[in-house]
Amino acid sequence: MTPTRRKLMYGGAATAAVLAGAGAGWLRLMSGADPAVEAFWTTSFERPEGGSLSMAALRGQPVLVNFWATWCPPCVEELPLLDSFFRQHAAKRWQVIGLAIDQPSAVRGFLAKLPLSFPIGLAGFDGTELGKSLGNLTGGLPFTVVLGANGGVQQRKMGRVSPADLAAWAQAHSIS
């Protein structure tokens, strides 16, 4: 086989592989069947005050999921803003949940000093892997994901959320 013919053959195979991968990704995007997101909806978390927080119970409405920790200053700084957003938008079927990547005792102590209106789940240090599966490639905190009423990821934000972020997300994902 000549070098030119070999290059054409390998180039064609590489192009076919890229197109197949892109096609599979497009189909997954169009079907909304992201395995990590589907797995998220089957998850439950222990709550600091006892009981369980089931993600399946929240499906069908926009959900803002905030990964945070008590030892993370930007996380702690944004919690009052998220709490205000939750109180303002709960009647519009928005849900906010905080998933604490922390020791349960630290979270309970923190919430005793700064109570929050929205539900908190104890994700523990395994929550870092959950965040990565939802698009937090670095594992940093805070990390926020907005899941639409269709159950799919609509927004991702690494770092502290701003009032402008929340306003844009509320407008883009409002339910009548």
Image (cartoon, rainbow, N blue to C red):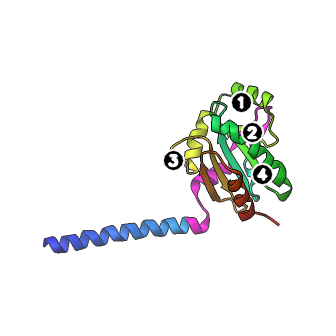
Q: Earlier in the sequence, mark 3 or mark 2?
A: 2
- Amino acid type, mark 2: Ile
- Does the rendering let one see residue 133? yes
| Nearest the eye: 164 or 48 | 164
Q: Which mark is residue 107?
A: 1
Pointers 3 and 1 in contact (C-beta within 8 Å): no
Does dot 4 land on a helix, a strand or a loop? strand
Q: Earlier in the sequence, mark 2 or mark 4?
A: 4
Horizontal and vertical percent position of residue 67: 65, 42
Whether the magenta-drawn stretch holds residue 114 is answered as no
Whether the magenta-drawn stretch holds residue 45 is answered as yes
Does dot 3 land on a helix, a strand or a loop? loop
Q: Which mark is residue 38?
A: none
Q: Which residue is mark 3?
A: 137
Q: Which mark is residue 95?
A: 4
Pointers 1 and 2 in contact (C-beta within 8 Å): yes
The residues colored magenta run 29-53
Pointers 2 and 4 in contact (C-beta within 8 Å): no
Q: CA distance from mark 1 to mark 2?
A: 9 Å
Q: Which residue is mark 2?
A: 120
Q: CA distance from mark 3 to mark 4?
A: 24 Å
Q: CA distance from mark 3 to mark 2?
A: 23 Å
Q: Residue at x 74, y 63 (%)?
A: 171
Does dot 2 land on a helix, a strand or a loop? strand
Q: Is residue 29 left or right of residue 56?
A: left
Name which quarter of the figure residue 15 lies in: bottom left
- Amino acid type, mark 1: Val
Give neighbour class at mark 4: few <14, some 14-19, many 20+ (Cα, 10 Å).
many
Q: Earlier in the sequence, mark 1 or mark 4?
A: 4
Q: CA distance from mark 3 to mark 1?
A: 24 Å
